[in-house]
């Protein structure tokens, strides 16, 4: 059974999932991942969702304010063994619902060009490509997407 837990970036399960995410990103982007690690730090984030299947943590994501009306989705991850089950979609919907409850009306995110499954998830969820936003403008491996939440 899937359970979604709202938490914060100090959550030990979130930290464990982030380690697994970073390991996967190093495998996909070995030549540039060091450039992204600095940008991907998530400390003091009060808006984290951790997904559990039968009490085991299997996925996560978080958001932070991007501007007065917009959130930035960060650190979306689901273990490969649990992909294709709708978990990432459920996490994303939970983040969007949470953001709406806080008055945000738009979401943006950055993902990598070597993550077609992530891009497909975001497009299926209503996200569309946008111009790259800072600090990703010059990063060739990045694509940025956006979605109105209303």
Image: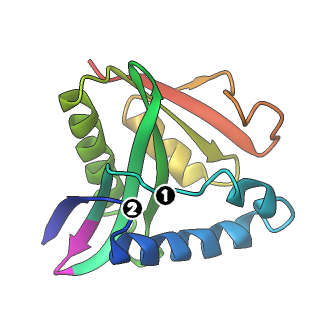
Residue 25 numbered mark, or none: none
* 3D distance between C-alphas at marks 2 and 1: 6 Å
Graded by Cα atoms within 10 Å as few (under 14), some (14 to 19) or many (20 or more), the crowding at tag 1 reads few
Instruction: Name the residue: 51% across, 56% down.
Output: 42
Q: Nearer the viewer, residue 80 or 13?
A: 13
CA neighbours of label 2 inside 10 A, class few (<14), some (14 to 19), many (20+): some
Residue 43 badge: 1
In the displayed orientation, state which residue is furthest to the left.
1
Query: Given contact means CB atoms under 8 Å apart, are the residues at marks 2 and 1 in contact?
Result: yes
Vertically, is 17 above or below 41? below
**Residue that appears at 44% across and 78% down:** 16
Q: Which range is magenta?
A: 51-55
Q: Quadrant of residue 21?
A: bottom right
> Which of the two residues, 100 or 117, is positioned nearer the viewer here?
100
Q: Give left or right: position of 8 versus 41.
A: left
Find residue 46 and report its horizontal and vertical position in percent: 32, 51
- Main secondary structure along the magenta-highlighted residues: strand
* Residue 90, percent from left and from top: 26, 51
Of the 4 image quadrants, the one containing the N terminus is: bottom left
> Residue 9 bears which disc, if any?
2
> Which mark is first along the chain, 1 or 2?
2
Query: Residue at point 32% right, 49% down?
Result: 47
Local SS, label 1: loop
Q: Is residue 90 highlighted in magenta?
A: no
The quarter of the picture where residue 65 lies is top left
Residue 56 spot, x, y in % from top left: 25, 82
The image quarter containing residue 10 is bottom left
Up/down of 9 relative to 45, above or below: below
Residue 11 is situated, as x and y percent measured from the top left of the image, at 33, 70
The residue sitting at 43% across, 40% down in the picture is 64
Q: Please tell me whether mark 2 sits on a helix, a strand or a loop.
A: loop
């Amino acid at each position: 059974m899937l359970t979604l837990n709202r938490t914060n970036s100090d959550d030990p399960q979130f930290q464990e999932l982030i380690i697994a995410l970073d390991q996967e990103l190093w495998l996909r982007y070995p030549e540039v991942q060091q450039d992204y690690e600095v940008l991907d730090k998530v400390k003091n984030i009060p808006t984290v969702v951790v997904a559990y299947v039968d009490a085991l943590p299997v996925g996560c994501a978080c958001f932070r304010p991007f501007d007065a009306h917009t959130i930035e989705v960060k650190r979306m991850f689901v273990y490969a063994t649990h992909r294709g089950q709708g978990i990432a979609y459920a996490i994303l919907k939970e983040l969007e619902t949470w953001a709406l409850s806080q008055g945000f009306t738009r979401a943006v995110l950055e993902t990598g060009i070597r993550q077609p499954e992530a891009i497909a998830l975001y497009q299926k969820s209503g996200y569309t490509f946008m111009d790259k936003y800072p600090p990703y403008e010059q990063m060739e491996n990045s694509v940025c997407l956006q979605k109105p939440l209303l």
